[in-house]
């Protein structure tokens, strides 16, 4: 992950989107690691709603696998872990 100094050095406010929360930064990091920049907003939403250790576990699995379709494998692993189960109150 980039340091704050590197981010600020390369930040162009006219072209870059503003990231104000930590979970947004992690969602962008996920989209970069999974080579899926098209669905950046999905990863930001996932990083907001799903606990960080679960996301990191799925990301480690994908990175270690060396798969061609990283995003699809990431979503499959999240489903296998049970990240999408609804809580019943």
Image (spheres, rainbow, N blue to C red):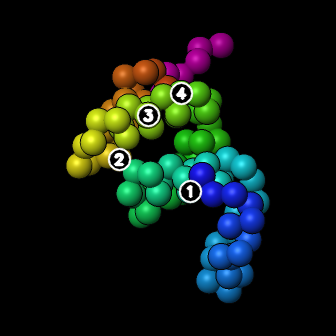
Residue at label 1? 28
Q: Earlier in the sequence, mark 2 or mark 3?
A: 3
Q: Are marks 1 and 4 in contact (CB under 8 Å)?
A: no
Quadrant in the rendering for residue 80 = top left
Report the mark closest to the observer, 3 or 1. Answer: 3
The alpha-carbon separation of the residues under discs 2 and 3 comes to 12 Å
> Alpha-carbon neighbours of circle 3 within 10 Å: few (<14), some, or many (≥20)?
few
Q: Percent x, y for residue 40? A: 50, 58
Q: Percent x, y for residue 29? A: 55, 53
> Alpha-carbon neighbours of circle 2 within 10 Å: few (<14), some, or many (≥20)?
many
Q: Which of marks 1 and 4 is nearer the N terminus?
A: 1
Q: Are marks 3 and 1 in contact (CB under 8 Å)?
A: no
Magenta stretch: give its range. Answer: 84-89
Left/right placement of residue 88 relative to residue 21 reads left
Q: In which quarter of the image is the C terminus?
A: top right
Q: Are marks 2 and 3 in contact (CB under 8 Å)?
A: no
Residue at label 3? 60
Report the mark closest to the observer, 2 or 3. Answer: 3
Residue at label 2? 71
Considering every residue shown, the one lying at the far bottom of the view is 14
The alpha-carbon separation of the residues under discs 4 and 2 comes to 15 Å
Residue at label 4? 54
């Amino acid at each position: 992950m980039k340091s704050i100094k590197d981010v600020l050095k390369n930040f162009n406010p006219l072209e870059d989107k503003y990231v104000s929360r930590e979970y947004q930064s992690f969602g962008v990091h996920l989209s970069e690691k999974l080579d899926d920049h098209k669905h950046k907003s999905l990863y930001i939403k996932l990083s907001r709603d799903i606990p960080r250790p679960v996301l990191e576990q799925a990301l480690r699995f994908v990175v270690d696998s060396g798969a061609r379709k990283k995003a699809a494998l990431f979503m499959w692993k999240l489903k296998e872990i049970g990240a999408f189960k609804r809580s019943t109150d």
